[in-house]
Amino acid sequence: MRTEDGYIITKCLNGEPEAFGFLMDKYKGSVYAFAYSKLRNFHDAEDVTQEVFIKAYQKLRSLRRWDNFLAWLYSITSNMCKNWIRSRASRPDSEFVEDQNAEALMQPSLCSYREDGITEILREAMDSLPETQRQVLALHYLGGMKGKEIARFLGISPGAVWERLSRARVQLREEMLGMISTTFEAQRLQAGFTMRMVEIMKRIKIHPIPRTTALPWGLSLAAGIIITILSFGPYLSILNPMAITAGSPLPVEAMMLKAGEIPVDILKTSEISVIASKQGDGDNGVPKLPEPHTAIMAAHGEGDEWTKKTDMPTARGWCATSEVNGKIYAIGGLIGIDVNTTALEEYDPVTDTWVTKADMPTQRNSTAIAVVNRKIYVMGGVNAGTCALSTVEEYDPLTDTWTKKANMPAARLGFSASVVNGKIYAVGGYACGRIILSTVEEYDPVNDTWTRKTDMPTKRVHLSTSVVDGRIYAMGGGNVRQGNADYNGLSVVEEYDPVEDEWTKKTGMPTARWSLSTSVVNDRIYAIGGGDRQVPSKTVEEYDPATDTWVKRDDMPTAKGAMSTSVLDGKVYVVGGINDKRQYLSTVEEYTPGFAAEKKSVEAKGKLVTSWGGIKSD
């Protein structure tokens, strides 16, 4: 927020009202949808949205913490809606009619009659829901917001958002939900709202702040412009260009990119002005950028960074990792052919150190792992002398203790697990006799019970699942055992909706593979490593569920499979694994994804020439 909203607020307070258009473009849908959830009238909601932004602009200087701009907007909108309702309640119907255009009242049309009917049905449907559910429903369908965006706007957890949305969906009939979605789509703010409001802002006088000698938090104008540009890609487009200035000329050569209703210049030259009057290493305080096309390259998915971290104490493959309370826990795994471990080791990314914790009660590898309420659940897997386990054990990092839980109905290994709304979903894998499964089972940690759900369309083992906006994405895996050659890799991607208990086929991975690991950063899924038969891979590919598209990212330093990944503070930690020389690894590599990648698919990657596989216990 500081690098985006704070930068724009600085521009506004320095006498550039047009810059406020970026904030309106970014948040207008959220404000409008929230206002509708309170007022249940589209025209009133649009009027309130305009008033909210006008008031926010007028009072902008009073906002002490610029990174609180969104919460501030929420507060202004909430208060204005209360005032609007109070004002409407005290106003007699006769007065309301007198205020209307008489000619308009005498010309009702069949179209408006139908629209009024639909609006009334919609209002009744929304009125049947509690306010908390109305809010998330409107923000999601009318505001077009994702779960994390709604959570940030309302100041609640993403889990609470999806719980409310799920309950709202359950309460409304399927056809009613479809009508709501269609009506909301048609009633979104019209293109041109932002530019119309910008013209209003130009006529409003606000007290400017003195020109600063440096942008807050030491941010250069170059960084501010790049961050601003890269943050506003998904919004609408139209109308006239607006240059961003900071009191000194910008470079001559520029490329136009539309961001919302306001196009922005992306800089292509190696020199750029800064707000500070005497900063940088160039002439007159103008810094020289070391790479002249940074902004352009970032838009194509560059800027990825891999960093070697301290090795894990126990070298292993097929282990499981999870993040709790800022620490990463590596549990179990295979340390030699048919040799499993119970080792549990805790990694602190801040100090880059490992600590040994209480061993897992059951030796095993190829487990699935999930976290609910800061407790880690380790499920299934395989031990020497067994074909598959149904064992479930819960680890509490706070007390460093283990607790036995209810067994899975289907004993299996090589499956994957993800959490939605406090429930764990165990997906795929294989059972005794090398029977590959499509089984999906839901575990309720509160009641310690299991429920069978709709099978995944594609049977597979050693797949990986990740969650974005309450949907589970099952990626890759293997489905044909070829002796020591292991499995044929799959590129299949299937999306599971736990609320509807339905599966949907999505665009497949460019690189078919099994024993991969997937992680989510900024609502993008990163599919890392794995292999096809005996071929390990360095491949990293990014999937955007919103557009159902894939982009190639920078390769991982080490080709491997059977590793595990966990995310902390926007960074992916790749732990352990098995390389092409059949070595068990203690390697830890930290991956920082670069700027958002350009939306275009990539071709399947060719196979590597090295070999691996046939070394795990199953």
Image (cartoon, rainbow, N blue to C red):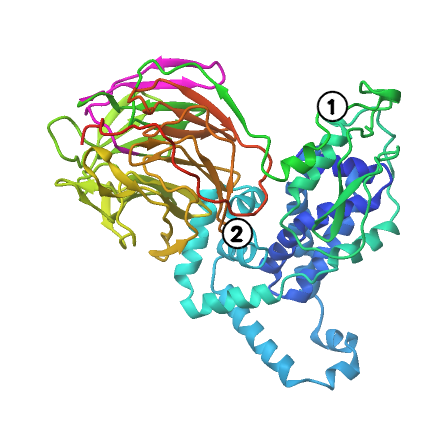
465 vs 10, left or right, is: left
Q: Amino acid at mark 2?
A: Thr
Report the mark closest to the observer, 1 or 2.
2
Choose top left, top right, bottom left or bottom right for residue 3: top right
Choose top left, top right, bottom left or bottom right for residue 283: top right
Q: Residue at x 88, y 30 (%)?
A: 210
- Dot placed on the residue nearer the N-terminal end, 1 or 2: 1
What is the x, y in percent for residue 498?
A: 36, 52
The range drawn in magenta is 339-368
370 vs 359, left or right, is: right
Mark 2 lies on residue? 547
What is the x, y in percent for residue 289?
A: 74, 25
Quadrant of the image containing the N terminus:
top right
**Label 2 residue SS:** loop
Q: Residue at x 22, y 26 (%)?
A: 615
Residue at the extreme left:
385
Quadrant of the image containing the C terminus:
top left
Q: Within 10 Å of the Cα at label 2, are there few (<14), some (14-19), or many (20+) other Cα atoms?
A: few
Q: Is residue 220 above or below residue 444?
A: above
Q: Residue at x 26, y 41 (%)?
A: 461
Residue 173 can be seen, yes or no: no
Q: Is residue 369 above or below residue 16?
A: above
Q: Is residue 365 magenta?
A: yes
Mark 1 lies on residue? 218
Tell me whether circle 1 and circle 2 mark residues in contact (CB < 8 Å).
Answer: no
Q: Within 10 Å of the Cα at label 1, are there few (<14), some (14-19), or many (20+) other Cα atoms?
A: few
Question: In front here: 617 or 60?
Answer: 617
Magenta span: helix, strand or loop, mainly? loop
What is the x, y in percent for residue 394?
A: 27, 30
State the CA–CA distance, disc 1 to disc 2: 35 Å
